[in-house]
Amino acid sequence: FGYGQAHTNIYYDLISGMPGDFASIIGTNQLKDKFDMTTTHFVLVDDKLTTNEIQNMCSEIKDLKGVHNVLAYEEFVGPGLASNFTPSVVKDIFQNGGKKLIVVNSDYKAATDELNTQLDKMDTIIHKYDKKGMIGGEGSMTRDLITTTNTDFAMVNVLSVIMIFIIVALTFKSFALPVILVLTIEFAITINMGIPFFTGTTLPFIASMVIGTIQLGATVDYAILMTTRFKEELSHGKKVKEAALIAMEKSSVSIMTSGFSFFAACIGVSFVAKMDLIKSLVILLARGALISVVSILLVLPSLLIFCHKFIEKTTKNWPESNMEAKGE
């Protein structure tokens, strides 16, 4: 499941997850069918560039693979026409606020390797003429998402684990228990995020962050409940295995009720959601709730039994087990 989690296919193109009957999607499809326009780039450069420089830049961009056409004021007017003869309405569209606009229509879809390569080459061309030139539009936005979200989301997941670790450590005054509880939930998260790889499902790019934080934060309470009851049974003189079995038995009703409620609330949304982004997330959350319940009821008690000596040595005021006294 760890391999599956690391190799699950992810999509960054938000439009592909929209219902086909949305007006924006219908319009986008019509642009593709009637005008061969898939993705549009909006290039902004300094208005101090000469007409000859703009024309040379446009010529280089046109030669790039996948570029359908390039629209610029200088492409139509040329250096021979004085600016006084140009309608202000037209001029204001392509030159405003100290910038000149160049519109580039691409044959490639956003969030694809082909488009990202095209954008990289466009950046190289643009910066030859204007070091501060920039590209806007959906394609450039998704490229930024791809290059930045992996790092940002990884940091979010790490920080969420650290914060949960600190909270549990302060609550139980323990070093071992936060490790055990967080590992139990992370084990459930790994299974949940690994399943899409084996089912051939493609997930939205925010799935790992949403599941990594919400499933951890929402279901760690189940682990805390189980551990608290385990501690209480030990304080009443129960042996380690007996305390774990009683904790599992007595906590299971509360844990299952909460987990099934979480599952029901999320799975219900999946039946009515039209956007693939929303549907994918709620299905992951619903499945994650059930996996966490199973993990806490089966895996956590085993870890508490196996690691009880480590817990005793690293937890303040932890009840001593009477395994030795009972001859176990």
Image (cartoon, rainbow, N blue to C red):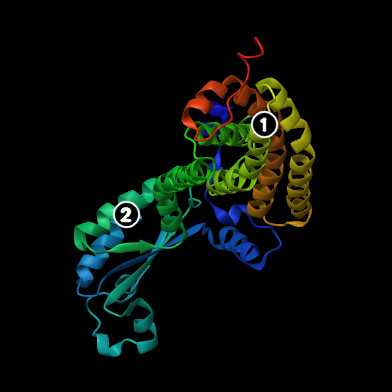
301 w.r.t. 257: above or below: above
Q: Nearer the viewer, mark 2 or mark 1?
A: 1
Q: Residue 158 at what x, y percent from top left? A: 45, 42
Residue at 21% x, 66% y is 53
From the viewer's side, name the closer residue of 196 and 141.
196
Q: Within the image, what quadrant is residue 103 found in?
A: bottom left
Which amino acid, mark 1?
A: Ser
Query: Mark 2 or mark 1, which has the lower sequence index?
Result: 2
Is label 2 in a helix, a strand or a loop? helix
Residue at 65% x, 63% y is 26
Q: Within the image, what quadrant is residue 246 found in?
A: top right
The answer to whether residue 279 of the structure is visible from this angle is yes
Would you name the residue on which mark 2 appears?
A: 122
- The quarter of the rendered structure image containing the N terminus is top right
60 relative position to 3: left or right: left
Would you name the residue on which mark 1 appears?
A: 295
- The quarter of the rendered structure image containing the C terminus is top right
**Whole-number angstrom distance, CA of label 2 to CA of label 1:** 50 Å
The answer to whether residue 65 of the structure is visible from this angle is no
From the viewer's side, name the closer residue of 301 and 88.
301
Residue at 41% x, 57% y is 140
Which amino acid, mark 2?
A: Met
Residue at 47% x, 44% y is 166
Is label 1 in a helix, a strand or a loop? helix
Q: Residue 270 at what x, y percent from top left? A: 74, 51
Count the labels in the image. 2
